[in-house]
């Protein structure tokens, strides 16, 4: 089945960088573009002078190095159930639905200082195992540098959102970089008996979902299609663009804006031929944030769905959210999508 590409705005965030001279006209233009994109699609592309093609090439090179390792090396650092999602996720170890997600991942976050005690369930040490000995110190540094770059880009987007909404948002994000999660993904081509667009298919790259957090920053390998957006009643391709990051609004941001900004439904499918690499940075608000509840139109958000391994999804009890902070709730969500793995 063929899908058409969607044309999303491309917003250059360079004028928001600290070293840029204040050009208020440019800033107003950015704020307007963000406002329109978030209200209409909940997705847009960003570029910035501090993220170049060499940065993109570098992270995908590091990602390939990891995924090329023998199974036993990757399996030595598995993520575990419980919601602290760092380490290797093998085929079948994660899904947002009853489907089999044909992907592998490496998940890591803020490089926690071993002398410091974590203060919540999303903080803690990355699982490098002995990868440093196998892939070299440079490998780990390149992943950590990439993490920092994505935190910085998320910060620029937050600045832009503050201008677009005319409200202060930074106080929601304090410490968010210590609980956010980076994923390196490798998707495998698969075939389904039914057509790919059919809801009954068993294999998928990533099940249709909305992201739970504040913002998601996706970088796609050039020229391999996979990410799709549900818009105006149908699925559209979101093509990769060199040195350009896809930004999704998350459920938290959508709720914070009382639904003004859309948390878009999206998925990943296979073109049936190619492996696909992407990186996905889930940028979270402060661990202790409360999830803003709104009465209407929030039932479609994945944050409120039960994503455990059942063929039907049903709503979580929203009452529960009144007592639990964002970080604790998200820890449970990661546990919901953990799977013990099976063959496909
Ligand atoms: O790999 C991608 O392009 C997107 C994956 C995604 O949407 C997710 O992991 O939440
Ligand atoms: Fe997503």
Image (spheres, rainbow, N blue to C red):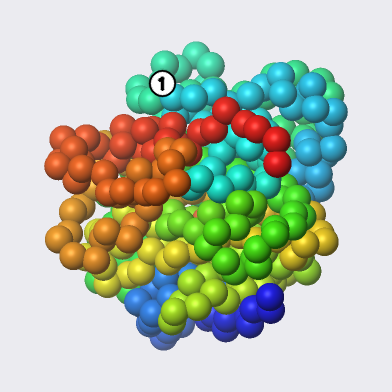
Query: Residue 78 lies in what quarter of the image?
Result: top right
Image side of residue 342 versus residue 57, left or right: left
Res. 88 image quadrant: top right
Q: Quadrant of the N terminus?
A: bottom right
Q: Nearer the viewer, residue 158 or 249?
A: 249
Between residue 231 and residue 31, name the one nearer to us: 231
Residue appearing at x 62%, y 31% in the figure: 341
Disc 1 is placed on an element classified as: loop
What residue is shown at x 18% (from left), y 38% (from top)? Answer: 320
Examine the rendered structure and indicate whether residue 165 appears above or below residue 289: below
In the image, is 340 to the left or to the right of 328?
Answer: right
- How far across and how far down the image is residue 37, in percent? 43, 78
Residue 254 appears in the rendering: yes
Note whether residue 327 is visible: no
Residue 185: horizontal and vertical position, in percent?
67, 47
Q: Is residue 315 left or right of residue 263?
A: left
Q: Residues within 10 Å of mark 1 (few under 14, many from 20)?
A: some
- Tell whether circle 1 marks a residue whose Cβ is less than 8 angstroms from ligand 1: no
Q: Position of residue 189 (x, y in %)?
A: 77, 55
Q: Nearer the viewer, residue 5 or 164?
A: 5
Image quadrant for the C terminus? top right
Q: Which residue is mark 1?
A: 118
Q: Tell me if residue 28 comes above or below residue 61 in the rendering.
A: below
Q: Residue at x 42, y 16 (%)?
A: 117
Can you give x and y, in whole percent of width and height, for residue 299 in the image? 27, 59
Residue at 35% x, 22% y: name it. 119
């Amino acid at each position: 089945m063929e899908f058409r590409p969607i044309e999303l705005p491309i917003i250059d965030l360079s004028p928001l960088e600290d070293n840029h001279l204040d050009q208020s006209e440019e800033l107003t233009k950015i704020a307007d573009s963000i406002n329109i994109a978030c209200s209409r699609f909940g997705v847009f592309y960003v570029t910035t002078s501090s993220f170049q093609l060499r940065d993109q090439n570098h992270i995908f090179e590091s990602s390939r190095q990891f995924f090329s390792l023998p199974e036993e090396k990757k399996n030595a650092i598995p993520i575990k159930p419980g919601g602290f999602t760092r380490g290797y996720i093998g085929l079948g170890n994660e899904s947002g639905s009853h489907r089999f997600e044909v992907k592998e991942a490496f998940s890591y976050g803020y490089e926690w200082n071993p002398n410091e005690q974590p203060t919540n369930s999303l903080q803690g040490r990355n699982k490098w195992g002995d990868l440093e000995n196998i892939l070299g110190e440079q490998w780990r540094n390149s992943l950590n540098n990439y993490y920092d770059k994505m935190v910085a880009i998320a910060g620029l987007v937050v600045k832009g959102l503050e201008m677009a909404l005319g409200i202060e948002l930074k106080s929601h994000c304090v410490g968010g970089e210590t609980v956010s999660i980076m994923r390196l993904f490798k998707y495998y081509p698969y075939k389904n008996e039914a057509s790919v667009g059919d809801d009954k298919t068993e294999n998928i790259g990533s099940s249709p979902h909305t992201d739970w957090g504040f913002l998601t920053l996706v970088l796609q390998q050039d020229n391999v299609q996979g990410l799709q957006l549900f818009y105006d009643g149908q699925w559209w391709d979101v093509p990769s663009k060199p040195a350009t990051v896809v930004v999704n609004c998350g459920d938290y941001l959508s709720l914070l804006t009382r639904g003004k900004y859309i948390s878009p439904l999206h998925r990943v499918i296979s073109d049936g031929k190619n492996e696909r690499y992407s990186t996905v940075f889930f940028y979270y608000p402060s661990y202790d944030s409360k999830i803003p509840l709104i009465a209407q139109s929030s039932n479609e958000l994945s944050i409120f769905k039960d994503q455990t391994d059942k063929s039907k999804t049903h709503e979580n009890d929203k009452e529960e959210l009144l007592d639990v902070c964002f970080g604790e709730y998200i820890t449970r969500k990661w546990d919901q999508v953990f799977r013990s793995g099976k063959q496909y």
